[in-house]
Amino acid sequence: MPTFRFFAVVLSITLPVAASASAETAAISPEARQHWAFRRVHCPPVPAIKDAAWLRTPLDAFVLSKLEAKGLRPSPETDRAALIRRVYFDLIGLPPPPDEMERARNDQRPDWYENLVERLLASPQYGERWARHWLDVARYADSKGYVFTEERRYPYAYTYRDYVVAAFNNDLPYDQFIVQQLAADKLPLGADKGPLAAMGFLTLGRRFLNSQPDIIDDRIDVVTRGLLGLTVTCARCHDHKFDPIPTQDYYSFYGVFANSVEPKDPPMLRPPEANAAYAAFEKELKAREEEITRLKVTRTASRIVGLHLPGTAVQIPLAAVNRAFQRADRDKDRALQKRVEQWKATSPLAPPRPMMLEDAPHINASHVFVRGNPGNVGEEVPRRFLAILSPDKREPFHEGSGRLELAKHIASNENPLTARVLVNRVWAQHFGQCLVRSPSNFGLRGDAPANPELLDYLAWRFMEDGWSIKKLHRLILLSATYRQSSEDNEAKRKIDPDNSLFWHMNRQRLDFEALRDAMLAVAGRLEPNLGGPAVELTKEPFSGRRTLYGFIDRQNLPGIFRTFDFACPDTHSPQRFITTVPQQALFLMNSPFVVEQGRRVVAQLHGEPTEARIRHLYQLTYSRDATDEEIAMGKQFLASAADAKLSPWERYAQVLLLSNEFVFVD
């Protein structure tokens, strides 16, 4: 022990110590203040271009200006069928049904495309698709990760997921979306408690064996990288190495979340129906809770009996009895509490409740932890916003924990980061690459925007349009830039190999959710109902629900999710990796799920001649007509396809499902 103490002393002397100056006087260099991401968003003038006839929306001028400066021309507009399939997958994550494809292809009205975009934005499936993009940002999962003996599943995680779906479908303004996710409990909600579910954004991260400093660090990270594109958690142990974020700013945020607690019994999001099912749930819950109470009463009574020594008015202090509390008793308590939590988490009868926060009953001052060590408390710091995003004179937060004030600072037109970060994320989902290639790092070491004027124009328009994400979609989707062909051009590729100037559309591979959902859709198996508790996706009989509703166990994420580059749910995910590995092809060739969908596709072909069947399959799977050559190849395949398990038609359907044309969107 003396050796350890000596080592600790030496360590404290030799390691560098974070600067002790307060954040109020921390030096932020003029160069840092002039960094593009820290300058206020403004509306840049629309650039003058040579070919004004190409423009469809103002953003096209910003794209074409960069192309013309390099001597490049945009690609031709893609064909109507490819555009229809593209916008279907972009907005709702599903292929167009054959009848809808036929209607859109034959629509002769000049505004046919605008009408299609409106129909898709109004579809409830739009919210499901775009909620999944946000859940990557929010590091959503249905479980806590490793937490030793307690129940690993969150009982009401799905209420956050369903809130996000509804927020996108209702086009909830993004600034309100932010405020509700950080501080819905501080808003005048009235009878509608639904927005409380928004706070799952903060509470659904990993639990780190219930280490409170690590839980708070995770919440700071999802807020700052997710909403602001800043790596504030790099300042946990010292001033940020690169960005103007002193460690005091980190602990200003830390104090906000340290003074926010999860209520033991959050309110119901809606009153339960007074029926037999709910009565059964309450009866079982009450029985499990009473078991805990009986154990405590029995244990207390047995101790009271032993408080007086036989033959003496000598009384053993209760504290001495408590010190004798046995591990077996603690384990029994945990086991019974786990049974209560399991019932809440697994019973389909449990009424939905929010995974929320509220202010602690007593607000405590926050302090710097020297080198990030909670046992080494340093100077006191006020709860307040980041110095680099604030005026010279910063006011401390004074309303409880400060979460509402923090949310308003983030969701402000004066904040130079929030709108830029969001429009960059939306652009990436539509084009397959960001304007800023480091979407969660807009700091000094992040990538500069490929087209800074375009980024600012989109961010400015986004705020001017009331922070409406659907209006942002319209601006992008109706542009000539979005409607370009994905065809390659060797000469243009030599000038701009990364397509950073967007001279053509990027061909994109379907993510795992869209791939699985598309298979269910063409097989006629996709269930349309929205919301509700998570379901198991990987076991037979296979669920027909959208992949969005699959149970996400962050400790034991199924291998198929990892194979297809699903976002890691352990932490905020800026963007998904795209890999090509043998396991992907093996899944498509051998998975019982894929085989089942192939069989169901064939089951939809009722007594049609061979050629008509082939045409029908192409319309279902590829949203287009089969060519004469493809029909001939199909007939040849069917004549030679012998398999003990699958009929020739079932094998043929599976071949179409595992092809590149099904898996990629042009």
Image (cartoon, rainbow, N blue to C red):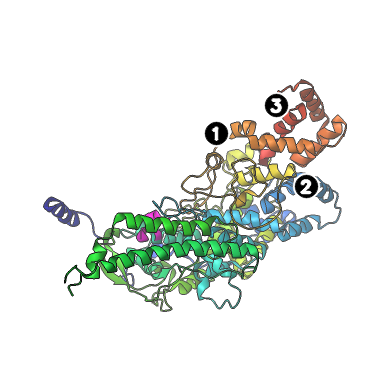
The span from disc 3 to disc 1 (Cα, nearest Å) is 26 Å
Q: Which residue is mark 3?
A: 645
Which quadrant would residue 510 be assigned to in this image? top right
Q: Is residue 31 magenta?
A: no
Tell me which residue sits at (77%, 42%) in the image.
623
* Element assignment for label 1: loop
Q: Residues within 10 Å of mark 1 (few under 14, many from 20)?
A: few
Q: Which residue is mark 2?
A: 97
From the viewer's perspective, is 181 left or right of 630?
left
Q: Is residue 46 visible?
A: no
Q: Upstream in the sequence, badge 1 or badge 2?
A: 2
Three-letter amino acid code at disc 2? Answer: Pro
Q: Is residue 453 visible?
A: yes
Image marks 2 and 3: residues in contact by CB distance under 8 Å: no
| Residue mark closest to the camera, 3 vs 1 | 3
Three-letter amino acid code at disc 3? Answer: Lys
Q: Upstream in the sequence, badge 2 or badge 3?
A: 2
Look at the image and tell me in which quarter the C terminus lies.
Answer: top right
Per the picture, the main secondary structure of the magenta-coloured stretch is helix
Q: Residues within 10 Å of mark 3 (few under 14, many from 20)?
A: few
The range drawn in magenta is: 207-215
Q: Which mark is residue 581?
A: 1
* Element assignment for label 2: loop
* Element assignment for label 3: loop
Three-letter amino acid code at disc 1? Answer: Val
